[in-house]
Image: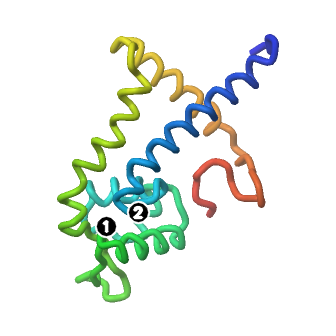
Amino acid sequence: MEQKNGSEIHLQKRLLNIVRTIHTRGFQKISEYGIHPGQMELIGYISLHDGARPVEIGKALHVKPSTVSVSVKRLEKSGFLETRPDGKDQRSIRVYATERLKQMKGQIWNELLENEEIALRGFSQKECEELLGYLKRIQDNFESISKPLTICCGKPANRKEEE
């Protein structure tokens, strides 16, 4: 792609502003429930895979086991998750949604879906599908790079777990 008047920089700036706005609004909405935005992916995963082991969660979310452990402990302390020993392997635990999370899940997701409705207001169904397709192609372009990009402190920019 040929650079035209710094359009690539404008793309980055525009995407960062959108992500920042969505993140800020989402944080404002879910912080009322005592949930950090970074914990939403874990909550979503457990909602679909109740009783998952931490190693499964880490692989699915492309995060380190220590990240899963810290998040599970915080969500357990907040009363959203509980851990129990694995019946087949006493060295391992399984993570379950509590009744509190099950009861609040609908409210939490509705709060977050409001962001999508606002972001896509005025778009036709076809335009929404095209936009998601374009964003997926951008993501695929970065994921196709064999060497992970690095950001501050030498941590990987893509969320692939380091082997």
Which residue: 71% across, 58% down? 155
Left or right: residue 15 versus residue 10 is: left
Is 134 on the left-hand or right-hand side of 50?
right
Depicted 94 relative to depicted 9: above or below: below
Disc 2/disc 1 C-alpha distance (Å): 7 Å
Q: Is residue 20 above or below residue 131?
A: below
Residue at x 37% of width, y 77% of height: 77
Residue 50: x %, y % from top left: 25, 63
Image quadrant containing the N terminus: top right
Near-viewer residue (20 or 70): 20
Colouring scheme, one of rainbow, by chain, secondary structure, one colour: rainbow
Q: What amino acid is labelled 2 in the image?
A: Ile
Check disc 1 and give the amino acid type.
Ala
x, y percent for residue 53: 35, 71
Which quarter of the figure is the C terminus placed in? Answer: bottom right
Q: Position of residue 107 (x, y in %)?
A: 24, 48
The residue carrying mark 1 is: 52
Mark 2 in CB contact with mark 1 (< 8 angstroms):
yes
Camera-side residue of 32 and 98: 32
Across and down, in percent, residue 54 comes to 40, 70
Residue at numbered disc 2: 57
Look at 38% across and 19% down and name the residue there: 121
Q: Would residue 163 appear left or right of 132 to someone viewing this image?
A: right
Give neighbour class at mark 2: few <14, some 14-19, many 20+ (Cα, 10 Å).
many
Label 2 sits on a secondary structure element that is helix
